[in-house]
Image (cartoon, rainbow, N blue to C red):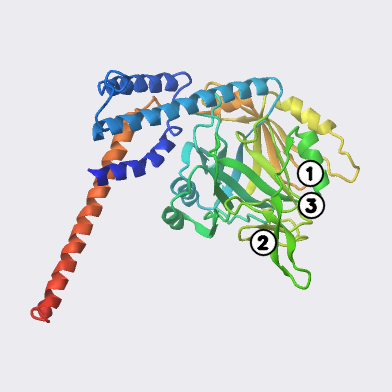
Amino acid sequence: GAAVMAGRRGTLSAMMALTVAKSSSAGQLLDYRRKELDEITRKIKKFNREGENPNPDPIGEEEGILLAEKTVLDTSISFLEENSRFLEEERQRIMNGGKFVQHMVLRVPDLDKEVKFWTKGYGMKVVRERVSGGKRTAFIANTPESLQTEDGGSFALELVETKKSVNVGNGLAYIQLRMGDTPRLSDLLQVGKIEFAYGFLQTESPAGYKVIQYVGDARRDPFELIAIRVADIGASVDFYQNALGMREVPIREPEKFVDAVGPLYGFGGLIRKEFERVNVFAPRPPKGSRYFCYGSNENSTMGVLLIPQSENCNVASIEIPKGTPIEVGDGFAKLAILTNDVYKEKDLLEKFVPKKSSYTKPSIQFTGEVKGVSLKGGTGTKVSAFLDPDGYGSVYVDYQDFENEQPPPPAPKSLVKEFEQMMDDANKEVKRAQAKQSQMEEYEALGDLVRSQKGEGYAGM
C-alpha cells in the first residue's frame, strides 16, 4: 500500500550508503554489480517501457521496487568506476614518488567504547584488527583501506588500546568529516557526547577526541581533515609544504555583501554596512588557518589544517583562546603517509633546510622494519617515524608493505538481496506504526464513549 511504499522510499537514502559499503577483491566487485544490473534490467523490460507500449499502466509496486534497485545499482557502479580510476592514478603517483595520507593513530583507554562511537555513531566499519605487544588495535574506516580494491582507498583511524588514561591535549583540535547525510542523533547520544548541533555537528568520543561533521556533497571518503594547532604558522607551512611535499589548498573566504541596516536620520537615506555571508551548515576554519593535502583533488584525500596559536581556535563549541600553550598530549600518536621508499624520504628529511634558522628541523625517531605485521609473506613493514616542528608524530610507510598488511576482502555480496531485506524491514516498521496508531484510535474512541455516558463505567477503567 501507499504507507508501505512510503516506508520503502524512506529507506532508499539509507540504501544508497550500501553502494559504497561492500568490499571485494580487485576486479570482482564491478563484474558482480554489472551482472546484478543486467538481471534487474531484464526483469524491468517485461513491463514494456521501452516504446512497445506507448501508454503504459501506472507504475505498480513490483516495478517500483525494481526501478529503485536499478537506481541503487547504477549509483554503486558509477562510484566503483570512478573510485577505480582514482585509485589507479594514486597508485601510479605513489610509484612515481608521490605520497598518500592513509591513517592516523589514536590511543584510547577503552577500545570497545571508541569502536562503537565510530561504527554505531558515524556508520564506519572495523576493517581490520590485531594484537601487538599485548595491545588490541582496531582500524576504523568507511570502506577498505587497500588501494587495490575497487571500493578501497579509505583513510582509517588506528585505535590502539592502552591500559592507562589518555591525555588528548589541545593540540589536535578536531577531526572533520563531510558526509552526504546527518548521522542519527539518537545513536550518537548512546555512544558519545553531542556538544553542538546548529547547522553541523560537533561530538566528543569516549576517549575525548572532538569530531566535527557536516553535510555537503558526498566525498569519496568522509574523512576530510585533521585540525592541529601550531606555534609558528610559518615554520609549519614550511615543513608541510617543503619537507613533506604537501600542496596548499586555498581556504575559501566567506562571501561579502553590502546591505541596509537602518535609516540615516537627517539625510534621507539608509545606513549601509558590509556583511559576510556565512554558510551556517559548514564549519568555518579558525582565522589564519592553512590547509594542505597530497594529490590534485582535495575532495578525495585526507588533509591537514594548521591553526596558528596566535589566533582564537573557535569552531562550534570548541573555544581555545589565542596564545593558549599547545599541549600535544599522548593521544594523537602519529599520521601515517604512504610512500614507495621510506629510506629515501628519511634522507630528504635529514637534508631539509628550513627557510629560517629559527625554524625547528624535523626529528627522525626511527627508520627500519617493523616485524610481524605482514599477512602476505613479507617479513614486516618498512617505516620512518619523525616529529614535526611542534612535536606531532608522523610516519612514512612503505606502500607495498602496507598492502601486505591488508586482510583478503570477502567475496561479493548481493546488493539486491540486501535491498530487499531493507524493504522487508521497512514494511515491518510501517506495520508496527500502523498497529500502534490503530490502537491509539481505539483508546481515544473508548474514552469518548465513556465521557459521553457522563461517567458511567468510568471507575471501572
Q: Position of residue 18 (x, y in %)?
A: 41, 35
Q: Residue type at mark 1?
A: Ser
Q: Which of the 4 image quarters holds residue 394?
A: top right
Residue at which label 3 appears: 231
Q: Nearer the viewer, mark 2 or mark 3?
A: 2
| Disc 3 element | loop
How many circles with numbers are drawn on the protein? 3
Looking at the image, is mark 3 or mark 1 earlier in the sequence? 3
Query: In the image, is 329 to the left or to the right of 429?
Result: right
Q: Position of residue 104 (x, y in %)?
A: 61, 41
Choose between 241 and 260: the one closer to the eye.
260
Query: In the image, is 27 to the left or to the right of 459?
Result: right
Q: Is residue 161 visible?
A: no
Residue at which label 1 appears: 236
Q: Residue at 12% of width from left, 81% of height from top?
A: 455
Q: Position of residue 180 (x, y in %)?
A: 50, 42
**Residue found farthest to the right:** 357
Q: Position of residue 73 (x, y in %)?
A: 39, 28
Q: Which of the 4 image quarters holds residue 156?
A: top right
Classed neighbour count for the residue bearing mark 1: other residues with Cα under 10 Å, few (<14), some (14–19), many (≥20): many
Q: The C terminus appears in which quarter of the rendering?
A: bottom left
Classed neighbour count for the residue bearing mark 3: other residues with Cα under 10 Å, few (<14), some (14–19), many (≥20): some
Q: Residue at 64% of width from left, 45% of height from top?
A: 226
- Cα separation, mark 2 vs mark 1, equals 22 Å
| Disc 1 element | helix
Q: The N terminus appears in which quarter of the rendering?
A: top left
Looking at the image, is mark 2 or mark 1 earlier in the sequence? 1
**Residue found farthest to the front:** 268
Classed neighbour count for the residue bearing mark 2: other residues with Cα under 10 Å, few (<14), some (14–19), many (≥20): few
Residue at which label 2 appears: 319
Q: Residue type at mark 3?
A: Ala
